[in-house]
Image (tube, grey):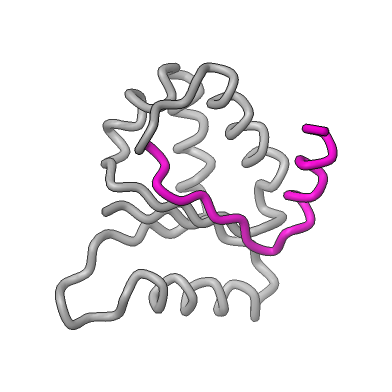
Amino acid sequence: MLGKRMAQMQKLDLLILDEVGFVPFTPEGARLLFQIHADRYLRGSLLITTNLEFGRWMEVFGDERLTGALLDRLTHRGHVLSPLHPGSQSFLETFMRHWQSAQSHQVSVPVALQG
């Protein structure tokens, strides 16, 4: 069943992970998230929303090496969108602009949103 789900996720143009950090990951869950991203790396876009700064992701994943490796991959060819000032574009508008630009150039771009 898990293998089938993983294969389905690889076919998506965009995978959205909302509220990462709201609940800490188990060690197995953290490794699974890393594997999902590793399999999708440079093949599909990934949108992650979180209200945690990167410096606090260790609290969520519990493993310093895994957290560092995940952050390295997320930021390698990704865009980090921070909270915007009132009256400016919404996160979704900003993300869609980046994503559409990447798609027009046939480049897969992972994106992390920090709030």
Residue 83 sits inside the magenta stretch: no
Q: Position of residue 55 (x, y in %)?
A: 27, 33
Q: Position of residue 29 (x, y in %)?
A: 57, 25
| 55 shown above or below 43 | above
- Give the number of callouts: 0
Q: Residue at x 51, y 56 (%)?
A: 47
| 27 shown above or below 25 | above
Quadrant of the rendering where the N terminus is positioned: top right
Q: Position of residue 84 (x, y in %)?
A: 22, 69
Q: Quadrant of residue 107?
A: bottom right
Quadrant of the rendering where the C terminus is positioned: bottom left
In-front residue for pair 60/104: 60
Q: Position of residue 37 (x, y in %)?
A: 62, 41
Give the magenta part as a residue range.
1-21
Q: Residue at x 59, y 19 (%)?
A: 28
Q: Residue at x 66, y 32 (%)?
A: 35
Q: Is residue 100 left or right of residue 6?
A: left
Q: Quadrant of residue 6?
A: top right
Q: Residue at x 42, y 42 (%)?
A: 20
Q: Is residue 47 left or right of residue 82?
A: right
